[in-house]
Image (cartoon, grey):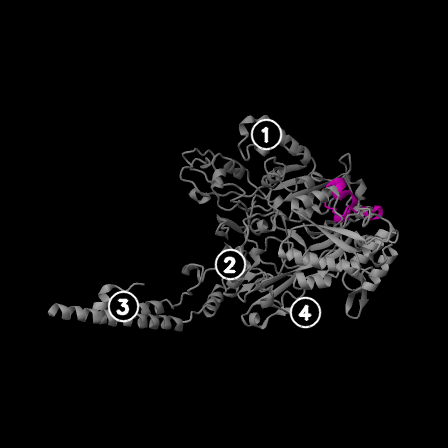
Amino acid sequence: MPVPHLLFRCPKLLFAWMLFILTGLLSACGDQVWNSPYPPEQADQNILYSSFSERPKHLDPARSYSSNEVVFTGQIYEPPLQYHFLKRPYQLEPATVTTMPVPHYLDEQGLPLPADAPADKIAYSVYDIEIQAGIHYQPHPAFAKDQQGQFLYHALSEQDLESVETLSDFHETGSRELVAEDYALQIKRLAHPRLHSPILGLMSDYIVGLGDYATTLKQAFEDNSEVESAAVSLDLRDYPLAGVEVLDRYRYRVRIHGKYPQFLYWLAMPFFAPVPWEAEVFYSQPGLKERNISLDWYPLGTGPYMLTVNNPNRQMVMERNPNFHGERYPQEGENGDAERGYLDDAGRPLPMIDKVIYSLEKEAIPTWNKFLQGYYDASGVSSDSFDQAIQVASGGDISLTPELRARGIHLNTAVSSSTYYMGFNMLDPVVGGDSESARLLRRAISIAMDYEEYISIFANGRGIPAQSPLPPGIFGHVDGERGINRYVYDWTDRGPQRKSIAEARRLLAEAGYPDGRDINNGKPLVLYYDTSGGGPDDSARLDWIRKQFAKLDIQLQVRNTDYNRFQDKMLKGTAQIFQWGWNADYPDAENFLFLLYGRHSKVEHGGENAANYSNAEFDRLFEQMKNMENGPQRQDVIDRMVEILRHDAPWVFGLHPKQFVLFHDWYHNAKSNLMANNTLKYRRIEPALRERQREVWNKPLIWPLGVIVLILIASVIPAFIGYRRHENQRVRALEH
């Protein structure tokens, strides 16, 4: 900062200027934290702060499926059912319905069948769903009407849109009651040819007439040349769907092919949330899509929150829906919940947080630092911050570091409803097939693949070795000695212990490959691992996988391609060995065991059975199991299915990942629920405590400012002395 020339002429003014600088710097050390990324007026507000790294692509419930999208859609939309926040195993309960739907069954002639009718006799399952009266949508311009009851914004002209850039530029809003027709409309929207719902194919197999309905709508678009540019241009209320019927204002009926108990789980997903016809009409108007004003950008629901700011380059904001229908925090949970404080808010109205601000964070380290400073209320644990956050005892026990515990930070861990595995292409002539030789080869590799070490090195201990496709928390999973894979593990006093490499080499020799050489021709056994990617982390992981095969003297060649090429190889069945994973759509054994069901093979049927595994007995048991209610009989069938998989070894059962979540003292009801996506309404924060901690953790250091001022003064004084000497010489020269 240059010093004004006048100051050199007046020493008193110079030092007054210096004092002004020092006072200004010190005055900034008031109550407001210097480094806060938020405005001062938010300091004590009931706001939750979080972050996102990637813009949600779809917020339309017919299209949205990604995990970064349900963060928002789960809070805005209300499907008929939801998961109980606290109870485990995961339990469905009403969200907007009056009671849990109970199907009744019909035969091919439409005649009623008893509840215990055999599954092969059931032609149709009929669900009558009754919603609660008095539920209203969030305020939205689509509902706004004038004094004559006419919609204000359903016939917008180009002139009307001249001053419109965002949804908030429509100054009038309205609302209306939720009705059964809104749920029926959303099911129809799954078949909309312009929406490309990711579950249309699956639901067409179950909802009566949905596949034909999609064909009808597609033809309607093709027949109407005037709607080529419209996002949505058909009034779906004019197109009946055979499997969906509105019975009255609050009741609708869904008819399903056969017996499909898992349909109830789908009723807890945003795919089956209501969409009002007014939203369809409003958002389909020309000129809105070009302004990013669409259901994909501005969702419209009855849930506890509504999206008020969608700026994916900076910030996304959800605020409390003033019309939310008064749900309350659960009054019971599972054992231990009361002791952990999860029932302290029992009976309180939901939601308990007024606003949620999500800030764009593309890098993990800034996100982590802001969490430590108290600017984010909860955080995951990335690889970059793992050592700073977590300490692992010699026995494998995981806890927070003393530094984080001293800050009042807490850790929640939960095993995800996911599985990651190494798959063998069962169509491959070497590793596939039903021969004893191929089976022994797969078992030997299963032993050699040390997933305990993998979890330690590449997942920082965040996972457990898998004994089957079923993760903990899913009915059918068995813990302890009874639940181990005895082809790969032995049970000891320390729990399951992986069998020795010597045992794996013995199996390899029995398979016809002693010391990794084909007994018939003496050539080394060369296997091929197909993958996509190629970053530094991938390179280290691939090196590790090669070493596991090298224990058996098997040469592993890695065939690395881009993801599209990899997908093509999987579809054609030209891959040999691969890594894959699955995140549960719903907490049922069927949603994992179908990954090995013969009729879902990827090559023959384009399904999710990437290993192309086929076993007639397994398939028979799957058909029986999928229609059974949870209980001892179903457990017995699942046990038999799992044993078949362990015997045949189409997968190397890899790991079930663990979720690590950190949260501050002021963040309450942090229990993990890995199936529910609407948990924000249960959270609670203490803004006053948060603000006090922020002030402590971000207190500025004053002394460097004093040093800076002293340096500044020291640098100015010589210039001042020189200037005064020059002025004195000039005055003396003028006098002479």
Q: CA distance from mark 4 to mark 2?
A: 31 Å
Residue at disc 4, secondary structure: loop
Q: Amino acid at mark 1?
A: Phe
- What is the number of the mark on residue 622? none
- Write the start and end of the magenta stretch as one range: 594-618
Choose top left, top right, bottom left or bottom right for residue 449: bottom right
Residue 258 visible in image: no
Q: Amino acid at mark 3?
A: Trp
Looking at the image, residue 118 sits to the left or right of residue 59; the answer is right
Q: Earlier in the sequence, mark 1 or mark 3?
A: 3
Label 1 packing within 10 angstroms: few (<14), some (14-19), many (20+): some
Which mark is nearer the camera, 1 or 3?
3
- What is the number of the mark on residue 48? 2
Q: Which residue is mark 1?
A: 221
Q: Are marks 1 and 2 in contact (CB under 8 Å)?
A: no
Q: Which residue is mark 4?
A: 397
Q: Amino acid at mark 2?
A: Leu
Looking at the image, residue 718 sits to the left or right of residue 681; the answer is left
Q: Which residue is mark 3?
A: 17
Q: Earlier in the sequence, mark 4 or mark 1?
A: 1
Q: Earlier in the sequence, mark 4 or mark 3?
A: 3
Residue at disc 1, secondary structure: helix
Query: Residue 254: horizontal and vertical position, in percent?
Result: 67, 40
Q: Are marks 3 and 2 in contact (CB under 8 Å)?
A: no
Query: Residue 70: horizontal and vertical position, in percent?
Result: 59, 50
Q: Earlier in the sequence, mark 1 or mark 2?
A: 2
Q: CA distance from mark 4 to mark 3?
A: 60 Å
Residue at disc 3, secondary structure: helix
Q: Amino acid at mark 4?
A: Asp
